[in-house]
Image (cartoon, rainbow, N blue to C red):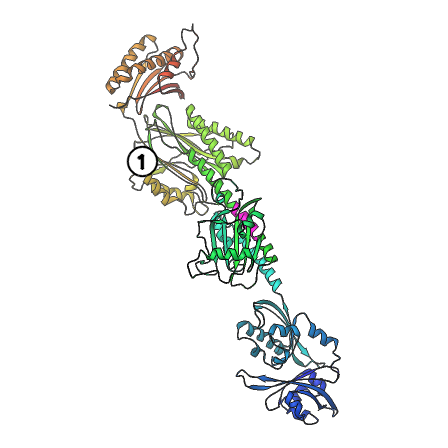
Amino acid sequence: MEHPSAVATLDTHGTVTGWSEGARRLTGYPAEEAVGRAARELLAEDVPADVLATLSGTVRTRHRDGTLVAVSLRARALTGADGRPAGYAVTVEPPGGGRTSLAELAFEQAAMSMSVFDTRQHYLRLNEVACQVMGVPEEELTGRYFSDSVEDAEHSQGFLHHLRQVAETGRPARYESFTGAPALNRDHAWTTEMWPVRDASGELLGTALAAFDSTEQYWARERLALLNKAAAAIGTTLDLVRTAEELVEVVVPRFADFASVDLLEWVLGAEESPAVFSEEVALRRVAHGSVTEGTPEAAVHLGHVDVHPALSPPARAMREGRVLVSQAGEPSFVHWVAERNARAPAGRSYRTGAHSMMAVPLRARGITLGVAVAVRMEQPDEYGSEDAVFAEELASRAAVCIDNARRFTRERSTALALQHSLQPKGLPGQAAVEVAHRYLPSVSAAGIGGDWFDVIPLAGSRVALVVGDVVGHGIPSTATMGRLCTAVRTLADVDLPPDELLTHLDDLVTHLVAGDSGDDVAELGATCLYAVYDPVTRCLSLAAAGHPAPAVVLPDGTARLVRMTAGPPLGVGGLPFEAAELELPEGSVVALYTDGLVEDRDRDVDHATAELCRALTAPANSLDALCDTVLKAVMPEEPGDDVALLLARTRALGTDQIRTWDVHPDPSHVAATRRSVTEQLTEWGLDEAAFVTELVVSELVTNAIRYGEPPIQLRLIRDSALICEVSDASSTSPHLRRAHAYDEGGRGLLLVAQLTQRWGSRQTGTGKTIWAEQPLPANP
């Protein structure tokens, strides 16, 4: 016989219930002729008593062709599910079995688990590795039904299903699972190949399998999948704490049973001040999580600071700049767990079972930001070298995201500080309008934008209202906004008309673009609306450079957008700006805003501006309350851009606060003009200001007669200050100069500058106006 071994199973009555291919080759009887027969019929003589007693020995069997064959026999008792005898498994070998074939040796010594089953899923053969996995010797499994040798679990049913499928279909199968085994203390990944076994005629005799322990490959794939997940899950926002929480959510529970993220104090602040490590390291807990609800393992509360001793794993990992792995039994690990347990409530040692931990420094761009700690308690595997490499890669990605969030926070704080410094803090010296404003910075990842607004007092009780928006986000846009805001204030001080002021501002932006290292004009482009309100004439003159038109609410409750030509954005160059004028009743509300209030990707601008007009007519106790009402009604739920809103309620100066004289261009009339001014001051109760005012009027009127052109006009305005204005038809602006000892003139404007609070000149449509302001005497 060529086959070295054969297997048969008997019931308790000695009837054959199973018959292997080896048995067929040994005896010549196929399975259909052997199964169901009494085993005694296949023997040439009765079984000796000693063989029956020891269930092993040599017997003679009769071959199907009538010849006698002596074989060595071994029998093993089989038990059923109830523990009672269910039969026997008989293994026979021909004499000379010591000469084992190469195939048999290969089967026995294979490095993977190999087994052979009959068509009814009973064990026929197992190699050494399979017996080690099952935890029992081969003789205890031979002849047993597969399900009787394993726990009744889902993975066992899946394995049995594939065995049956191969036996029924005769086609090989591949089965992957992550399960435990009777002799293993933890789950393993298995890749099992199953294939049908046939005889020379093609008849299916059973199923063979080889199971590969692919645990290392499984965990390698898991780590790679976890890295892919981390790439998408960590850094979804630019919130530093949320980024740390995302790191914890990725590693728990797939990589750790407990994880925490602690950061250095300076990382959470707005200042750039990397710490120099000393013996102890103080860290603030920003995120932690565990497989246990409520994270009871945490010895440090969120937001609290913990000081790590110099020899603790977290402190060492940060100081040495490498992943530090500690296992149960190591002094540093024992001390760390004991120190943590000491903080737990009495009798509640949540860290029982902790056997492996890993401290991973969070480093980005060469700077250490903090440390992440991972602990295993329920997972049986200890952290190894492959886990350390994975943790280092994961921590590197997370640290970059944390550093990006830190940099964004710092840049945002800087931009907000710059924005805040440029916002109007008060309006001393002007009473032309009552104002209220709101500025809401963008919360998008793009950063703070370049929106700004301003209220600038001008001569003659007038006031300039400005709102603008620089294209782009971040520090560059905020810095450009600062330059433009300063430029507008400078040009406003020159008292240029709105359209001329925007022309000068457009030239400035064009020069900024030309001097920038990049050539992208749009990035330094901007929009701006500049308006001037005169409480004497109640006239609002305004011009826009690519900016939305303001809305006006009249005292009767009607609201509308101002009809005007927006003009090109700043930085385009070469195109004119057009000014518009309208007369407003006292108590009108002018609303200036940036496009972030009405523009959004999913909104219609016309509909949004209509909502703005409706919101402006809503009842409100104050302008501040009206600001809040408008923002609540109009602003997008998640604005992707900064929002600036400036509301101004107009006031008007009454005729009793203004006095105007036409001056005859003759020096002999200056004295009469002074007397008229003195009488008016007496009527206003401002006799204390008469001396200085007479000197100012005398100098300004004399200069206008001497150097200007008629018609000449003098105007006194009693507002928050006493304003003296002299207008003439000449466009030549005066300037201060130092008079020499023998000069007969040249001291007038110097005298005016010394006697008044401030003075200046502005161009008008018919010439120029020279003005001077002096404070009013305090009320007694």
Q: Position of residue 704 (x, y in %)?
A: 37, 13
Q: Position of residue 322 (x, y in %)?
A: 59, 50
Asked if residue 290 can be seen in this view, the reply is yes
| Residue type at numbered disc 1 | Leu
Q: For residue 220, which quarter of the picture?
A: bottom right
Residue range highlighted in magenta: 394-403
In front of the other: 682 or 466: 682
In front of the other: 625 or 585: 625
Left or right of 666: which side holds 209? Answer: right
Left or right of 517: which side holds 682? Answer: left
Location of the N terminus by quadrant is bottom right
Left or right of 29: which side holds 336? Answer: left
Q: In this picture, is 270 found above or below 106?
A: above
Q: Position of residue 636 (x, y in %)?
A: 41, 46
Q: For the point 49% across and 54% down, which residue is it?
A: 260
Q: Per the image, is 255 magenta?
A: no
* SS at circle 1: loop
Q: Position of residue 141 (x, y in %)?
A: 61, 79
In front of the other: 371 or 720: 371
Q: For the point 40% across and 8% down, which residue is it?
A: 745
Location of the C terminus by quadrant is top left
In front of the other: 82 or 397: 82
Predominant SS of the magenta segment: helix
Question: Circle 1 sits on which residue?
Answer: 554
